[in-house]
């Protein structure tokens, strides 16, 4: 009987092992697969709080932005009604997301 | 005939790129997320390519002609969702190391039951989303080649499932990125030509019209004339914005970049790409109102406009380009969806292998084709709207609370998912099966996100008993927010993760 053996380089073996780690399921006690290295819980706690505040802020700004657009759309009609939704939303959405990412990365650099 | 030829060309190009990437499809993770080796720029383009579906290319313009300028809110909502993706989910999801939403749910909540539940929700969302894609393929093929609707739908099913079965997602990433460019080129370039060819009179009528029906010209969505424009606009906006965050096939794509930071940036890139794209369906819609005001099938307005404006050879060529763009939209979205659906079927529900994954693709296609046949009469955007409403009522609360709130428990999440999927699909079914008087109630059932999303959030929060929070919950949440260098372990970190 011929059996096919897969020959892999050390890098590939490492990559495969990492992949199978990520695929590992919850253990019997229900604990999910987490890296066994200790983390600085206090620093992580601070990072979470700052990121959460930032995320909340972005969410509220987005809601406010859409509300303003909605009011503007409700007030406009006739010939140029379509122009409100054509020109305004996308640059504003992009600015909001870009500002969030910049701040989130700054928080990560600090923590 | 020209239309059919250009569609075939799109198809051949997709298959060639797909086969070029076939080497990657060797193990399940390879097949699903392309081994995390995809460059961010390609990835953003792939997400946009997969996301700009038939709903955007065909449905938006059709709805604009039929219902009014308010249809543009769909584009706004589809894009606004990525602000939330960047802010709430992209980074932490990438750090969780999970491949799919069900994977994430298992990681965060430590329960295999919830993984299977999420797998079922994935199936519901993906199917609701796939049906309008196949409908789009059917109507476009019917228009350009004259084959019956059902032949187009079945043919499209065969094409898509065989493309995926040989390629997998690595190829899909390049195919999707290619499709974004293709869609942009095939929709944008003819649009510019058509604006020019329409001539000053028709241009004025289309872009600065006078004497319009005020209901049509007001940029709010009043579906089926229910007389509730604000309510339905807000509800559709909630569904599309929050639903984008919960779409399983989009979330999956963030695992193909190197780290959390890159994942976030990919989301911002997607906003740019979508913002550019969504300008063009509006052009077709506004021109369509002038040159094709009463089409027998509103969802093909985009493909009808070139022929109406430019008769003869020029019109035929432009029609062929637009039809190819529409078919590319169908092909890219449906292959992404089918892959996520197959992932749900095999990986999350049955513990997968590659052959099962391929069987999953075939099964998903069959189901979607079968359901698309009777759906010929339903507007594409209405069907897509339901898929978004279900995603917004299920995975949006699950991911938001799971990532940012340690108090979420498996019990709470299960209850919230059941309530979310039950109410949102229930409302859609009532709309399909009954004939309600147009009014506030019919709007709340046809566009249920405005009440089902808060309900699902509230259920998850209230049903999460503090006593049921496991001791490791703290750590599993905190790890989602740690920059790479704070959690260094034995594994090699890429430069992207270290930054």
Image (spheres, coloured by chain):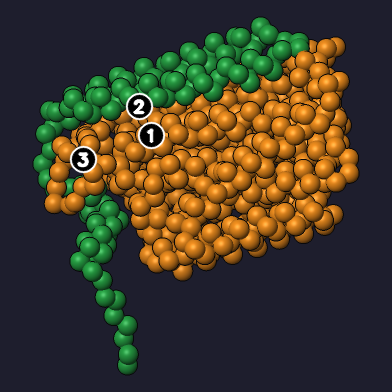
Chain colours: A green, B orange
For disc 2, the neighbor class at 10 Å (few under 14, some 14 to 19, many from 20) is many
Q: Check chain identity for marks 2 and 3: say if they share one.
A: no
Indicate left or right for B79 with B1 as reference. left
For disc 1, the neighbor class at 10 Å (few under 14, some 14 to 19, many from 20) is many
Chain bearing mark 2: A
In the image, residue B10 above or below residue A96: below
* Residue occupying the point 59% across, 39% down: B52
Give coordinates of residue B150: x percent, y percent.
77, 56
**On the image, numbered disc 2 is attached to which residue?**
A101
Give coordinates of residue B386: x percent, y percent.
61, 36
Give coordinates of residue B97: x percent, y percent.
30, 47
Check the image and name the residue furthest to the bottom.
Answer: A1
Q: CA distance from mark 3 to mark 1?
A: 16 Å
Marker disc for residue B498: 3
Q: Check chain identity for marks 3 and 1: say if they share one.
A: yes
Do residues under tags 2 and 1 come within 8 Å of each other at their CB atoms? yes
Residue B345 in sight from this viewpoint: no
Chain bearing mark 1: B
Task: Give whichever of A7, B203 is nearer the camera.
Answer: B203
Q: Quadrant of residue A20?
A: bottom left
Check the image and name the residue furthest to the right.
Answer: B312
Do residues under tags 2 and 3 come within 8 Å of each other at their CB atoms? no
Name the secondary structure under disc 3. helix
In the image, residue B78 above or below residue B231: below
**On the image, numbered disc 1 is attached to which residue?**
B265
Indicate left or right for B125 with B375 as reference. left
* Residue occupying the point 20% across, 66% down: A10
Q: CA distance from mark 2 to mark 1?
A: 7 Å
């Amino acid at each position: 009987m011929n059996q096919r053996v897969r020959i892999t380089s050390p890098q590939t073996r490492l990559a495969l092992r990492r992949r199978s780690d990520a695929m590992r399921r919850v253990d019997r006690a229900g604990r999910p697969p987490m890296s066994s290295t200790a983390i600085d819980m206090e620093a992580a706690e601070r990072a979470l709080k700052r990121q959460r505040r930032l995320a909340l802020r972005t969410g509220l700004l987005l809601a406010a932005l859409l509300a303003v657009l909605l009011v503007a759309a409700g007030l406009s009609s006739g010939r140029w009604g379509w122009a409100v939704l054509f020109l305004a939303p996308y640059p504003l959405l992009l600015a909001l997301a870009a500002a969030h990412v910049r701040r989130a990365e700054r928080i990560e650099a600090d923590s | 005939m020209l239309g059919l030829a250009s569609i075939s060309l799109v198809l051949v190009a997709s298959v060639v790129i797909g086969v070029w990437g076939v080497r990657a499809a060797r193990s399940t993770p390879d097949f699903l997320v392309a081994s995390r080796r995809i460059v961010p720029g390609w990835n953003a383009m792939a997400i946009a390519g997969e996301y700009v579906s038939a709903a955007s290319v065909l449905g938006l313009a059709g709805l604009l002609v039929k219902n009014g300028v308010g249809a543009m809110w769909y584009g706004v909502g589809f894009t606004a969702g990525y602000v939330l993706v960047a802010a709430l989910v992209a980074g932490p999801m990438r750090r969780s190391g999970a491949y799919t939403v069900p994977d994430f749910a298992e990681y965060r909540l430590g329960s295999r039951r919830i993984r299977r539940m999420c797998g079922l929700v994935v199936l519901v969302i993906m199917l609701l989303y796939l049906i309008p894609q196949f409908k789009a393929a059917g109507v476009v093929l019917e228009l350009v080649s004259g084959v019956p609707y059902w032949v187009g739908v079945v043919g499209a099913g065969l094409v898509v499932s065989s493309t995926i079965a040989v390629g997998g997602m690595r190829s899909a990433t390049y195919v999707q990125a290619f499709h974004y460019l293709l869609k942009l080129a095939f929709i944008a370039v003819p649009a510019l030509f058509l604006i020019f060819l329409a001539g000053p009179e028709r241009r004025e009528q289309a872009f600065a019209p006078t004497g319009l029906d005020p209901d049509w010209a007001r940029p709010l969505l009043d579906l089926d004339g229910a007389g509730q424009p604000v309510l339905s606009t807000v509800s559709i906006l909630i569904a599309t914005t929050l639903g984008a965050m919960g779409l399983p096939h989009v979330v999956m794509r963030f695992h193909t970049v190197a780290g959390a930071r890159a994942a976030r940036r990919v989301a911002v890139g997607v906003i740019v790409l979508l913002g550019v794209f969504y300008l063009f369906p509006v052009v077709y819609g506004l021109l369509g109102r002038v040159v094709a005001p009463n089409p027998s099938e509103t969802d093909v307005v985009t493909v009808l406009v070139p022929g109406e404006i430019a008769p003869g050879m020029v019109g035929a060529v432009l029609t062929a380009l637009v039809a190819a763009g529409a078919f590319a939209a169908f092909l890219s979205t449906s292959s992404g969806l089918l892959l996520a659906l197959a992932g749900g079927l095999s990986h999350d529900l049955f513990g997968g292998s590659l052959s099962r994954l391929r069987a999953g693709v075939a099964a998903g296609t069959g189901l979607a084709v079968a359901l698309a046949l009777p759906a010929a009469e339903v507007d594409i955007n209405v069907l897509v709207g339901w898929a978004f409403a279900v995603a917004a009522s299920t995975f949006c609360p699950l991911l938001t609370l799971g990532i940012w709130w340690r108090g979420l428990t498996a019990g709470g999440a299960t209850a919230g998912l059941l309530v979310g999927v039950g109410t949102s699909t229930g409302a859609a079914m009532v709309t399909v099966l009954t004939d309600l008087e147009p009014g506030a109630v019919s709007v709340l059932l046809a566009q249920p996100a405005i009440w089902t999303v808060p309900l699902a959030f509230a259920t998850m929060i209230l049903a999460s008993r503090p006593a049921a929070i496991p001791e490791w919950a703290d750590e599993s949440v905190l790890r989602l927010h740690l920059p790479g260098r704070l959690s260094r372990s034995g594994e090699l970190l890429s430069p992207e993760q270290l930054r």
